[in-house]
Image (cartoon, helix red, strand yellow):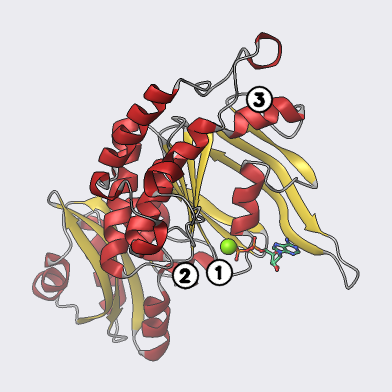
Amino acid sequence: MIEIKHLTKIYPSKSGDTVALNDIDLTIPDGAIFGVIGLSGAGKSTLVRCINMLEKPTAGSVVIDGEDITAVKAKRLNLLRKNIGMIFQNFNLLEQRTVAQNVRFPLDIAPRYSKRSQKDSPVPFRVDKARREERVKELLELVELSDKANSYPSQLSGGQKQRVAIARALALRPKYLLCDEATSALDPTTTKSILALLKDINEKLGVTVIVITHEMKVVESICTDVAVISNSKIAETGKVAEVFSSPQSDIAKELIIPDLIRAIESEGGKKLRLIFAGDEADAPVISGLALECGVKANILYADTKNIDGKSFGHMVIAVSEEDGQLEAAKAYLLRHNVRFEEEL
Ligand SMILES: Nc1ncnc2c1ncn2[C@@H]1O[C@H](COP(=O)(O)OP(=O)(O)O)[C@@H](O)[C@H]1O
Ligand SMILES: [Mg+2]
């Protein structure tokens, strides 16, 4: 588990300090695929770089599996860091080395065992050459690139490069994988395949994945939990199903449902937002309103999905302002256990 407590990061400069993170509290449970979304400049990359101490926090702490990594000595930190893999938007591969050599790199430079300082290592110590080669083979199979072992990065597509980076990040069997805009440079089809791979890694290897992104679709498609970051602070956090179906903060509403906001602004009538978070029904609502209680309702916006016969998402309807229509609609929704919000 990663516990971020009162984390503040200030970048000082002569022309004025930048507060990139302002008193952040966040808990990332083991086994999660945890999304962090926000606009550019919100502080996402700074947050993820503080989790592995690439950036030293100005104040606060990052506690990983009970150990405050902002307080440990350099040697210990170096070891703990190896339990946290990281991938980036621009892949950061070693261009002069082959795919296999890139993946082998962390194994080649893994710490050697020394009783005094490294007895509680969370990751494997350096193993002999034959076992390193074996591990590389295994990793390339995992990311489906066995046939590219001897290629150079320049010979690969973006998606393949990211697969190499993922294999390399997993070489030492880390418990955590940080992904900073890992799919932002990829086309939609490649993005899908990389996200599917990350999900697989989470499920099969039990790696906790932290996904930093400005793309809502990424969070929606693989994350279990999400934190929305805005102006250096956490605006909102929770389960994806909950936050995406019922965002509370202005920034989350704007990020998650911009079309909805436009729809609401452009139409007359009384608006209701219906929320489906795994409930039984959605489509019959409009016909039910008309048939059962004579309410005229228009769908202004709908973004619902059916997963295993249950509905997720939301729908905004406009109800006629004629006398009694809104009350009748609300009574109908209550009778049918459909969650709704009036204040949009
Ligand atoms: N190394 C740095 N030095 C100075 N300012 C920085 C540095 N890195 C980021 N910042 C500033 O901190 C804020 C947050 O940046 P960042 O964490 O990169 O946001 P995001 O990843 O959400 O786009 C921005 O205002 C950015 O300009
Ligand atoms: Mg960033």
Eye-nearest disc, 2 or 3: 3
3D distance between C-alphas at marks 3 and 1: 31 Å
Eye-nearest disc, 1 or 2: 1
Q: Is mark 1 within 8 Å of ligand 1?
A: yes
Residue 245 visible here: no
Rendered location of residue 293, percent (x, y): 15, 72
Of mark 1 and mark 2, the one earlier in the sequence is: 1
Q: Contact, CB < 8 Å: mark 2 with mark 3? A: no
Q: Residues within 10 Å of mark 1 (few under 14, many from 20)?
A: some
**Which residue lies under the disc numbered 3?**
67
Q: In this view, which residue lies farthest toward the right?
A: 14
Taking the spot 63% from the left edge, 68% from the top edge, the residue there is 41
Of mark 3 and mark 1, the one earlier in the sequence is: 1
In this view, 211 is above or below 173: below
**Which residue lies under the disc numbered 1?**
39
Rendered location of residue 273, percent (x, y): 34, 69
Taking the spot 44% from the left edge, 30% from the top edge, the residue there is 173
* 168 sits to left or right of 285: right
* 302 sits to left or right of 110: left
Task: Please give the label number shown on residue 255.
Answer: 2
Which amino acid, by three-letter code, is at mark 3?
Glu
Rendered location of residue 60, percent (x, y): 75, 41
Q: Nearer the viewer, residue 111 or 294?
A: 111
Task: Please give the label number shown on residue 306.
Answer: none
Q: Contact, CB < 8 Å: mark 1 with mark 2? A: yes
